């Protein structure tokens, strides 16, 4: 059983920052990182910005491995026995530690109706970026928060047709003053983005190579069908708390 002075669960930017912090005070202690994604830690914000503006993929990486750390990627920590200082991953591998950090971030919220795998991209990971950048020409983007507005802009800047579907009256309406949300929505429209407001998705169906997104008005119950090559949603995230809760940590 491999033993580490420091074991980090999670392979995001927090994990990378923690590795660098540890190295400042302990240059020699053994560190391991268990990350569920197949990729080593990368700069997540680039996924909706720099990569679409032509920045090369190699600028994405945090280069955590340069800090002298064992990376266990594509593995999910399933069991945490805090008393025994032991972690078991989804392949049954066991790790023991002196100190543990949970840096497991959050998972995108999903639509309850979307049960079929891989129809809607709940944009969060490099895998999601790869999938989206391989898709066709016309996209529906659901949600007017940071993810929705950034991805809509990214796709439009790359010559794609974009239809935004917003529950509220404009882009960013849940965080900006009304006038600013209206200004933003007009600005996107000027750039060729179709911005639909006061609508919410109720189902998705496959139509050959394409997807049909069915939406319903919030106030008037009229339905609309939007035919696209890909659907992206940014509905916010929920924290990953299961591992800690199952281990009896916090959550009190
Ligand atoms: C497209 C996009 C753009 C963004 N842009 C900005 C921005 O401009 N400015 C800003 O401040 N923030 C931005 N954010 C938010 C920012 O990226 C997050 O706040 C940050 O990534 C959080 O890092 P984290 O490491 O704590 O969590 P996460 O990034 O969620 O990483 C957690 C990692 O742990 C892994 N994991 C979870 N459970 C387990 C387990 N049991 N075992 C192993 N691994 C596990 C996950 O797969 C994931 O890789 C953006 C987010 C996205 C998605």
Image (cartoon, helix red, strand yellow):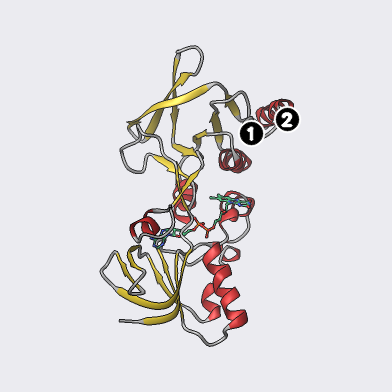
**Helix, strand or loop at mark 2:** helix
Q: Which of the pair 107/129 is nearer the observer?
A: 107
Q: Which mark is residue 140?
A: none
Q: Is residue 187 left or right of residue 15?
A: right
Q: Is residue 46 left or right of residue 98?
A: right
Image point (30%, 74%), residue name: 94
Image coordinates of residue 174 in percent, x first then y, are 62, 32
Label pair 2/1, CB-CB below 8 angstroms: yes
Up-down: is 38 above or below 162? Answer: below
Q: Which mark is residue 180?
A: 2
Outermost residue, front side: 252
Inter-mark Cα distance, 2 to 1 = 8 Å
Image point (36%, 74%), residue name: 85
Q: Report which quarter residue 119 is drawn in.
A: top left
Quadrant containing the N terminus is bottom left
- Residue placed under numbered mark 1 in the picture: 172
Q: Report which quarter residue 154 is drawn in.
A: top right
Q: Report which quarter residue 209 is drawn in.
A: top left
Q: Is residue 176 left or right of residue 208?
A: right
């Amino acid at each position: 059983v491999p033993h580490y002075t420091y074991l980090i669960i999670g392979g995001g930017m927090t994990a990378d920052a923690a590795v660098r912090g540890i190295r400042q005070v302990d240059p020699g202690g053994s560190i391991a990182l268990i990350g569920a994604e197949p990729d080593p830690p990368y700069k997540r914000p680039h996924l909706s910005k720099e990569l679409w503006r032509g920045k090369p993929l190699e600028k994405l990486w945090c280069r955590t491995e340069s800090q002298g750390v064992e990376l266990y990627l594509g593995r999910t920590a399933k069991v945490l026995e805090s008393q025994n200082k032991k972690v078991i991953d989804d392949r049954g591998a066991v790790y023991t530690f002196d100190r543990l950090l949970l840096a497991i971030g959050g998972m995108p919220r999903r639509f309850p109706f979307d049960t079929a795998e891989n129809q809607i991209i709940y944009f969060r990971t490099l895998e999601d970026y790869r999938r989206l950048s391989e898709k066709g020409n016309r996209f529906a983007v659901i949600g007017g928060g940071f993810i929705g507005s950034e991805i809509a802009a990214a796709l439009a800047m790359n010559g794609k047709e974009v239809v935004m579907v917003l529950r509220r009256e404009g882009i960013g309406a849940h965080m900006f003053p009304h006038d600013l949300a209206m200004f933003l929505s007009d600005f996107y429209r000027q750039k060729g983005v179709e911005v639909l407001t006061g609508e919410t998705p109720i189902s998705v169906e496959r139509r050959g190579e394409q997807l049909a997104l069915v939406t319903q008005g919030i106030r008037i119950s009229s339905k609309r069908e939007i035919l696209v090559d890909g659907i992206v949603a940014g509905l916010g995230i929920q924290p990953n708390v299961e591992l800690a809760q199952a281990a009896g940590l916090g959550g009190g």
